[in-house]
Amino acid sequence: MRPRPRVLRALLLALLALLACRETGEAPVRLLEEGFETSCEGLPCGWAQAAGPDGAVTWVSTVHPGERGLRLEGEGTAALGPGAEGASVTVVSGALEAAVSGRCDEGTALAIAVSVVAPGPRPVPADGFAGEARLPTEWSGTTFTPLVGTTALLDGGIGPGGWFLEVRSVRLEVVGPGACEIDHLILDGVGASDPAGPDAC
Amino acid sequence: MRGARRGWGAAWLGLLLPALASAQGFEDPGFDRAFDPEAPAGEGEGPAAEAPPGEEPPSAAPTGEREEPTAEASTGAEAPPAAGGSARPSAGPAGAETAAETGAATLAPEERIELPPDPPAPDPSMERLDDGSVRWLLGLAFLAGPGRDAPLDDALAARGFGPPSAVLGGEVQALYRPVRGLAFGPRLGLRHRHWAAWEGPPAALLSLDLMLAITARLPIGSRVWLGGDLAGGVGLGRLAIRDGRSTHVLGRFQVSGVFALELVGALRATVRAGYEWAPVDLPLGDGRLGGPFFLLGFEVRE
């Protein structure tokens, strides 16, 4: 009994669909995305301790042996991270947005400050944005935090679309007596910082 | 660990085999005789029971050289059970003797006793397997996952992974069939699910579990069987994120309907559709490696 051509064609299409599922497509261009996955001399590559006692900033495993993050312990302890190549972002009400996967001890928050430049023809809306992320005490999903510009925009605060910004540096600082751990950080325009990855079949 | 699994399987089988045998009436010697023509005749039944101790029992087959029935033989039908057991003629070859041969025709009408009616013919679907059959079933399962409604999905999304894939898996099972249409035994299941990432390998959850499966089917026509299937067990799940691995215990319970089609000889195609529950307790958040599933497989009866 020979298989019917129609059956063979359906099988071929199913195989092609499976192969297509392996293609994840293009990743969105972020203002900055940091997963803290690689270590350079005990800290995530590109990161350095900026404040606090020695050893207060460490590279740790977080929720899984394959998931790493940055741990900052004690009031005022800070880490300085690298910049990024830049992206076109939408600034709403003079703010950017941070999407943070992390946790902090009770009564402790994480201050986030980002320094940017605008290499394009359009003037920079602000040279810095900052905010304070109130992270949960246990690991959970994503916490979205607005990062407000340090300089008011000329148009009253709303800059819809089209600023090309480059991040020069990121600073994370513990606010409070406890410790914070962060294993994923995204900086982007408001409403554009969803960290979700590509669809899988 | 492997030994402990085998111990569990043996314990389950040890509990279920007697229960199923009892439920199907296999402990009834009459059931055995009814379905197995080679089963020995019971005590007190047939000519052997009529032979005095120490003497050769008369041949069961009519030889045509039998002597005229004696008075003892003619009254044998009235013998109490303690002496001769059941008065009903045997259903075996000895039962081929006619009433004239046994001398019953010489009895006066008032001396005759009313024999109980013959037992009803056995249901073909409950035919006992006299070949010690073991059914081996090899299957490949395709399962549709529940989507992004598990905490693990959200936890991975927060770390840059995409929504979960459908669950893919396979099963191998070796089921013992005490009767046609009913089988039970161990089932080994493999499941896989992944979450794609923009960069690097996807996160993946792989499980291997051992279940005890019970399937019951009824014949619909000459080649088609319909029925239901229940299975439950435990296993190990392995979550891989980037270069890290972690192992976790999970449970699995599945319920499904079964459609089987006899193909050639002992080969059957089977389709199962149902739902399975397989929660996994993870530090990132509970995951689910189950959901509605569709299984296409083949089984070979040995």
Image (cartoon, coloured by chain):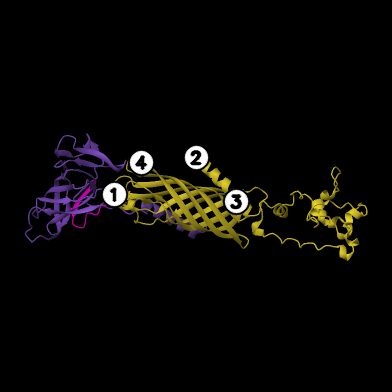
Chain colours: A purple, B yellow
Identified by mark 2, the residue type is: Ala
Same chain shared by disc 2 and disc 4: yes
Q: Nearer the viewer, mark 3 or mark 1?
A: 3
Q: How many marks?
A: 4
Q: Nearer the viewer, mark 2 or mark 4?
A: 2
Same chain shared by disc 3 and disc 1: yes
Residue picked out by circle 1: B198
**Which segment is the magenta one?**
A183-195
Q: Nearer the viewer, mark 3 or mark 4?
A: 3
Q: Is B158 inside the magenta-drawn segment?
A: no
Same chain shared by disc 3 and disc 2: yes
Identified by mark 1, the residue type is: Trp
Local crowd size for mark 4, using a 10 Å CA cut-off: few (<14), some (14–19), many (≥20): some
Question: Residue A163's spot in the image, x, y percent?
Answer: 13, 55
Label ID, residue B4:
2
Local crowd size for mark 3, using a 10 Å CA cut-off: few (<14), some (14–19), many (≥20): few
Q: In percent of the image, x 81 and y 63: which residue is there?
A: B114
Q: Chain of mark 3?
A: B
Residue picked out by circle 4: B245
Residue picked out by circle 3: B19
Mark 2 or mark 1: name the one nearer the start of the chain: 2
Mark 3 or mark 4: name the one nearer the start of the chain: 3
Q: CA distance from mark 3 to mark 2?
A: 23 Å
Q: Nearer the viewer, mark 3 or mark 2?
A: 3
Q: Are marks 3 and 4 in contact (CB under 8 Å)?
A: no
